[in-house]
Image (cartoon, grey):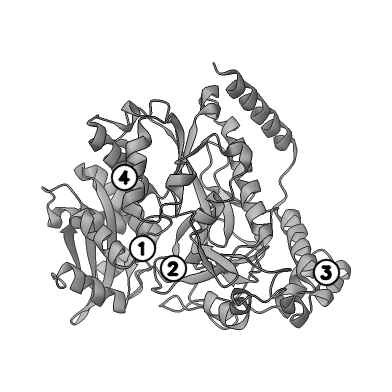
Amino acid sequence: MAILGSLLKRGIRLTNAVQRRKKLNPFKSQKKTLLKLIEKARYTQFGVKYGFDEVLREGHFGGERGVYEAYKRHVPIYDYNKIFAEWWHRSLEGEKNVTWPGRVTYFALSSGTSEAASKYIPVTKAMSKAIQKTSIRQIITLGKYRHLPASLYEKGYLMLGGSTQLNAREGHFEGDLSGITASQIPFWFQRFYKPGPEIASERDWGTKLDEITQQAAGWDIGYVVGVPAWIQLLMEKIIAHYKVKTIHDIWPNLAVFCHGGVSFEPYKHGFEKLLAHPITYIETYLASEGFIAYQTHPEAEGMQLVLNNGIFHEFIPFTEANFDADGVMAAQPETLMIDEVEEGKEYAPLLSTCSGAWRYLIGDTIKFVSKKKAEIVITGRTKHFLSLCGEHLSVDNMNKAVELSARDLNIDVREFTVAGINHDPLFAHHWYIGTDNESVDADNLRDHIDAHLKELNDDYATERAHALKNVFLTVLPAQRFYDWMAAKGKMGGQHKFPRVLKKDQIKEWEAFVGGSQV
């Protein structure tokens, strides 16, 4: 047993034991975080305009909830377009003290899965430190996974992300958040970090995968981090190159896959075929706006929100009163603090962060699985759901139905997307499934997905008997999805294929794959 690994594991377990004695109080942690953020930003242009001094005064003398009630009254809710047009464009142009003290020198480029144009998300020094701190906390939680060997802590950590060779533009640097964070890895972690600085700086995604493949046999990897689709693609490439059966033939000590960005459920069946034995899966919620949540223990149903490290959370009930059928937020939606939420209900989170985001609609939807532990699951996007006629179909429903259907038919679904379409005189859904199983019967797969969705969602079952009369399904090679991403300039890194196509995207996709095929 490795001496260093044993010492690290003992230290991690001791840290976890100390932390377990501290009782989690989400409300107190979040109130303290909000006060810290407002205090730090009180003299910025944003803080002056929205009376952060007054918010602090009311917070100190307005009772237990005073600071939050004052904050809600003083500060409006923002989405990306609004906050960029009013504030962040000034930071991008080099102004100091706009929404956070000092000058912002790093911007994460993020287009998510719905917008064509890149978003410029500020990444302040405070946020970089917060992400590193949360990353270390997550590594410490590995001590709770008692089945993991002590030797894991001496193995390589492969982090598959965007290029660390950032674009220099007029006084700032821009790139994927994964590239920004990888370029700032602490010196003590360098010996464990793969693929190393040279390969990590490569901008061409295909070249990067080729270079990793060439070096893979010389690395002892224990821990892999990345978006499921790209990690699976890399593993398949390595297995094919070395003509072996599983990735464990190359990396026998691979024990942990830390995934995020999209639900792992649709990928899991195909992913596990690349392994010689089970590994541990750990889910994270790391967005361009910050490190929001992560899985903290083996039995966790969801991910625990980061409550005391530079992020203040609010929650808008994801209901028809607060969002229309296209996912557009109402002018004055209801907002809740963490002690006011209910388990099992969907919410759209708002973030206030040490990167100068204030009451910022990130665009995801979440559900609390444990209010006491502040544990959540991601259910989809505010604009990535289907409700043409009241079926209220979430991405969470879609992921589960695809996963179950893939297991039913013993196929590997690599990617999928669905479009809601008019089908005279009513409506229909059109699924596109990316798989390399050539013998898949599209009608059979459609029926399985449809049946599982009826079990998962009562509204869907009702509408299938009324307004949603038809469901279509087209099977495509998985490469068609990757070709679409490449055509959009979204290969690799944190880019994901949209689970729901809407409006112009439907026409573009249909043209790309050669017509509606209905």
Earlier residue among tags 4 and 1: 4
Look at label 3 and name its amino acid: Gly
Crowdedness near tag 4: few (<14), some (14–19) or many (≥20) residues, C-alpha within 10 Å:
some
Earlier residue among tags 3 and 1: 3
| CA gap, disc 4 and disc 2 | 26 Å
State the residue position of label 2.
111
Mark 2 or 3: the one toward you: 2
Q: Secondary structure at mark 2?
A: loop
Earlier residue among tags 2 and 1: 2
Q: Residue at x 71, y 37 (%)?
A: 19
Mark 4 or 1: the one toward you: 4
State the residue position of label 4.
210
Q: Secondary structure at mark 3?
A: helix
Look at label 2 and name its amino acid: Ser
| CA gap, disc 4 and disc 1 | 18 Å
Earlier residue among tags 2 and 3: 3
Please, which residue is most extreme toward the top here? Answer: 1
Please, which residue is most extreme toward the right here? Answer: 61
Q: Residue at x 63, y 27 (%)?
A: 8
| CA gap, disc 2 and disc 3 | 36 Å
